[in-house]
Image (tube, rainbow, N blue to C red):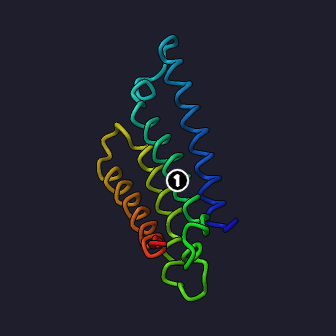
Amino acid sequence: MPIITRLYVRTSLVYLIAALTLAVLLALSQVVALPAALRAAGPVYFHLFLVGWVTQLIMGIVFDVPQVFQERPRGSEDASSHHNLRAAKRWPAAASAGRAGRAVNEGRLWSWALVLSAVLQWLAGVFFVANTWGRVKER
């Protein structure tokens, strides 16, 4: 399994645990007095779960599905595609930095940090598409 796939899948599992932990805390806030910021963390839970776990898992698995992309398996792993390899290596950094920034700043007054986290996540999507687009061919 390529390192990018392992990195993405493992990181997605960390986000899954973080999202489920937050879900427990959100449920607990119904019966125990917890800080207001924690009680308002519903959007953070949703973001960690959907973007952190589901989207990141999909991106990692798509990178490791060579049988679907017969002509260029894994796209960026072949030596002729250094441009795509650079893009693929940037996914985890941009995605994780964006997600972490979003989780920390959700609901706070640091609007510039939310914008930066959104841009980083957008860049991760662009890098993913740049690496994957050319691999999707008709059979």
Number of disc labels: 1
Quick check: 21 above or below 129? above
Residue extending furthest toward the right: 1
User: Quadrant location of residue 38?
Assistant: top left
Residue at image x 56%, y 66%? 68
Residue visible at 48% across and 73% down in the picture: 135
Instruction: Name the residue rendered at 39%, 67% in the picture.
Output: 126
- In depth, the one of 98 and 83 nearer the eye is 83
For this rendering, which residue is in front, 33 or 40?
Answer: 40
Left or right for 110, reference 132: left
Q: Nearer the viewer, residue 42 or 138?
A: 138
Q: Which residue is mark 1?
A: 56
Mark 1 neighbour density, 10 Å: few (under 14) some (14–19) many (20 or more): many
Residue sticking out furthest to the bottom? 80
For residue 32, above or below residue 40: above
User: What percent of the width, then of the height, locates residue 57?
Assistant: 56, 52
Q: Whole-percent x and y of residue 72?
A: 55, 78
What type is the residue that disc 1 sits on?
Gln
Residue that appears at 47% across and 70% down: 132
SS at badge 1: helix
Residue located farthest toward the top when viewing the structure as drawn: 31
Residue 43 figure quarter: top left
